Image (spheres, grey):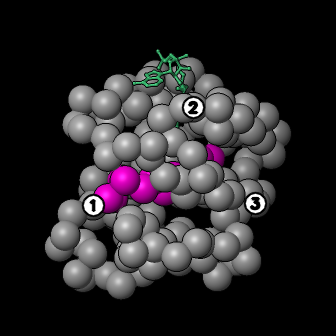
Amino acid sequence: MSLVQLIYVSTAVEELPAPKLEAILESSVRHNREHGVTGMLLYAQGSFMQVLEGEEAAVDETYGRICQDPRHHQIILLTRDPVARREFASWSMGYKHLGDADFRQNPDIARLFGNEAGTPSPDGADASIALELLRQFANSQR
Ligand code: FAD
């Protein structure tokens, strides 16, 4: 039994209104609960960042399904690493919609997300920044 943690960013094919985001979240929670996957999803200005963690096979199957989803594209895998323990164990899928105040307070958000974002690269540096952002928002919801 080996645990992995995977982080990706992606771009929504259109600015998603609340009901469409809620539909994504509803099916995420339902499936993740069933497969023992935990994590956190951030959405900002048409971009997603998500961390998935759980048993390797379950995380890979879930990520494979997510990659086929026509509601987003330009999916960039930032990291997929073995981990000793879960960091987001409380959530089948935590969720936060980032607003203007979040962008103003943290320049890393603009770097990795939304209209101003360059192309995040899976070189390790962006993965660390992404993980730190996900931790911050998870802690703020505890
Ligand atoms: P349903 O949710 O009932 O959807 C049926 C099919 O229709 C799916 O193929 C779905 O892709 C497609 N679909 C549904 N609504 C729309 C729509 N409005 N427009 C176009 N196609 C649509 N799933 C997880 O299990 N865990 C996750 O953590 C997770 N995170 C996600 C993060 C993002 C950013 C996105 C975009 C999707 C995520 N999903 C996640 C959803 C995943 O991609 C699959 O859609 C879902 O797991 C399929 O669930 P389902 O078979 O119950 O189908």
Disc 2 to disc 3, how far (Cα)? Answer: 23 Å
Considering only vertical position in the picture, is 55 above or below 86? Answer: above
Does the image show residue 127? yes
User: In the depicted view, which residue is nearer to us: 46 or 141?
Assistant: 46
The residue identified by callout 2 is 69
Return the x and y of residue 58 as percentages of the image width and height: 71, 32
Q: Which residues are magenta?
A: 43-53
Residue at 45% over, 43% down: 13
Label whose residue precedes the other's in the sequence (1 or 2): 2
Residue at 38% over, 33% down: 25
Considering only vertical position in the picture, is 15 above or below 37? Answer: below
Return the x and y of residue 103 as percentages of the image width and height: 27, 75
Q: Are marks 1 and 2 in contact (CB under 8 Å)?
A: no
| Residue farthest left in this picture | 101
Mark identifier at residue 81: 3
- 91 within the magenta span: no
Q: Amino acid at mark 3?
A: Asp
